[in-house]
Amino acid sequence: MAAGDYNAVRNAIRKIIPQASYDDGSAGPVLVRLAWHASGTYDKKSGTGGSNGATMRFKLEAEDEANNGLEYARKFLDPVKKQFPWISYSDLWTLAGVVAIEYMGGPDVDWKPGRVDDVDEQYVPPNGRLPDATKGEDHIRSVFYRLGFNDQEIVALSGAHNLGRCHGERSGFEGPWVPMPTRFSNTYFKLLLRSQWHRRKNSVGVEQYNDEDNELMMLPTDMALVKDPKFKPWVEKYANDKDAFYKDFAAAFGKLLELGVVRGPEGKAMRQYARAKL
Ligand code: ZEM
């Protein structure tokens, strides 16, 4: 296969998304989370972190508690990397998020190649840059403003919780947000507004919000989106206007995957460029 044939890589990613014996039969949600966590370490002030470098291959970042379970996503992609050794892990992880969103019925997201994998640990960002689900709106803002997002983009990105589930042994939280966690939709926003959520301790003793039947869940950070007077209008908008959500999600997710990626003249992302900007 010719180097640079990203459509061939996209097809190979589509083939590994159905995983009969994993979760809800799909690797899609955990691939989306891998792309997000690879990118969400960015810090706009120092220019450090972000998807370039694929620094989650290194122990410090792989073992950040926030990344528990993402080894599944990385393993699902191993055969694709073997088939296309010329693609960098940093491009593969971000592209897999894009392909997974599209595969699950979500919007097309702009994606550009050119990320270069780091060869050593020198640029691994410190642990603790990803959001903590036990916290509230101030914490959410401090993390996402550090990434360069505004309130509208924060709510749009949070709509990714239409996908997948929480795993007690990974995060301490349990359950899916929506009844069909492998279809992209705006159901998460509708449920945030319409369901009665009660706070309870789950089976591992962690406080979360559940619906009447304890089948669906919300994190404390999810509930902050309807408590906060600036976030809530965006939740209402996306609950009522699916097209607006898809459009805004695609823009914000595309922006997320580009954080910290500074490309040189040939399109290759380079550490020298990132540092020159500091
Ligand atoms: Zn999530 N997320 N996330 N998220 N996330 C989980 C799962 C998934 C937060 C969070 O703590 C958690 C964004 C924002 C935020 C996905 C995508 C995106 C889980 C469950 C937690 C605890 C992990 C587990 O147990 O396996 C917090 C606090 C967030 C912001 C305040 C953004 C932004 C995302 C993408 C754009 C996805 C797809 C999942 C489901 C993963 C899976 O394995 O099913």
Image (tube, rainbow, N blue to C red):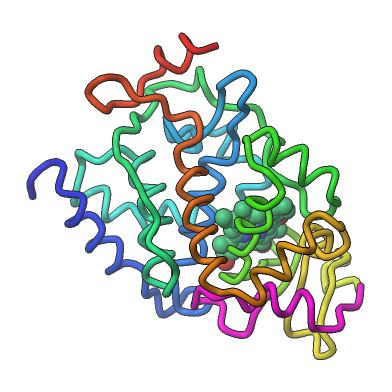
Q: Residue 181 location in percent, x, y?
A: 56, 77
Residue 100 location, quadrant:
bottom left
Look at the image and tell me whether residue 176 can be seen: no
Question: Which sits in the foreground, 76 or 160?
Answer: 160
Question: Which sits in the foreground, 109 or 118?
Answer: 109
Q: Residue 142 location in percent, x, y?
A: 77, 37
What residue is shown at x 26% (from left), y 54% (from top)? 80
Residue, far left:
2
- Quadrant where the C terminus sits is top right
Q: Residue 189 location in percent, x, y?
A: 69, 72
Magenta stretch: give its range.
176-199
What residue is shown at x 48% (from left), y 32% (from top)? 55
Residue 91 location, quadrant:
top left
Question: Which sits in the foreground, 132 or 276?
Answer: 276
Residue 187: say if magenta: yes
The total number of labels drawn is 0
Above or below 255: residue 15? below
Look at the image and tell me whether residue 168 can be seen: yes
Residue 114: say if magenta: no
Q: Residue 139 location in percent, x, y?
A: 82, 43
Above or below 259: residue 191? below
What residue is shown at x 84% (from left), y 54% (from top)? 134
Above or below 97: residue 192? below
Q: Is residue 9 left or right of residue 50?
A: left
What residue is shown at x 74% (from left), y 85% (from top)? 215
Question: Which sits in the foreground, 72 or 223?
Answer: 223
Q: Which quadrant does ligand 1 occupy?
A: bottom right
